[in-house]
Amino acid sequence: QDDLLWERPMLLIFLVAFIIIGSFGMIALLTGVISESMFEKNQIRAQESRQEQDELIRKLGVKADEIHAMLELTEDGDATKEDIAAFAMPLVARLYEEAMVDFTEHNLEQLVEVMDHGGDGLINAEEFKSCVITYASGVKPLSIQEVNFGVNQCMHKLCKIEDALKQLPGIEFDRQRAPSSEVR
């Protein structure tokens, strides 16, 4: 039987080709199965990450509302920037530590400054909650879109003001410079 392969060379060629092609086929099959498994695990991991992020945002929102409600509020439900900085931000820092959100004390001080959307020194619950959540979420494309939207709204309003100023007698307006009031 040792001479069987040498007596029938076609059988030898068939067996060698079968083993080589079969080996490549098995390698390709295993590679495909492993790759598909990796993609599925990655999709599941991404979905779990999104769910964890959503849950974190929900919890931070609830806690932010609770913290704001604990502060001394005006009749309109607003807190002063000073109260937010002194009493609320240490609690926010603890929240961020528990949620493993990266922050510094300077970041929290700056956060208080940008919370005051109206510029009146008062921060309502929605402003507080929005800033706490947005900082914890990090910079995302949506955050950039929100900034872009706000800038575009401001530009639109400024154009309206400019058009109204052009209608006033005695005011010359140059886009390159600020309006000048010259009495003639």
Image: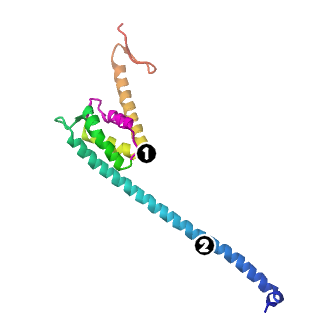
119 drawn magenta: yes
Task: Describe the element under mark 2 as helix, strand or loop.
Answer: helix
Return the residue at label 2.
29
Q: How many marks?
A: 2
60 vs 31, left or right, is left
- Quarter of the picture containing the N terminus is bottom right
Which amino acid type corresponds to the residue marked 1 in the rendered image? Lys
Three-letter residue code for mark 2: Leu
Residue drawn 42% across the image and 38% down it:
148
Q: Where residue 123 appears, x then y in whole percent?
A: 26, 35
Q: Residue at x 31, y 52 (%)?
A: 58
Q: Quadrant of residue 171?
A: top left
SS at badge 1: loop
Q: Which residue is mark 1?
A: 140
Q: Quadrant of the C terminus?
A: top left
Q: Position of residue 19 (x, y in %)?
A: 71, 79
Q: Is residue 138 magenta?
A: no
Return the x and y of residue 91 as percentages of the image width and height: 29, 43
Say which quarter of the image contains residue 122.
top left
Please state the extent of the stretch shown in magenta in the rendering.
Answer: 101-122
> Furthest-right residue in view?
7
In this view, the residue in front, 107 or 18, is 107
Q: Are marks 2 and 1 in contact (CB under 8 Å)?
A: no
Crowd tier of the residue under label 2, counting other residues whose Cα lies within 10 Å: few below 14, some 14–19, many 20 or above = few
Observer able to see residue 56: yes
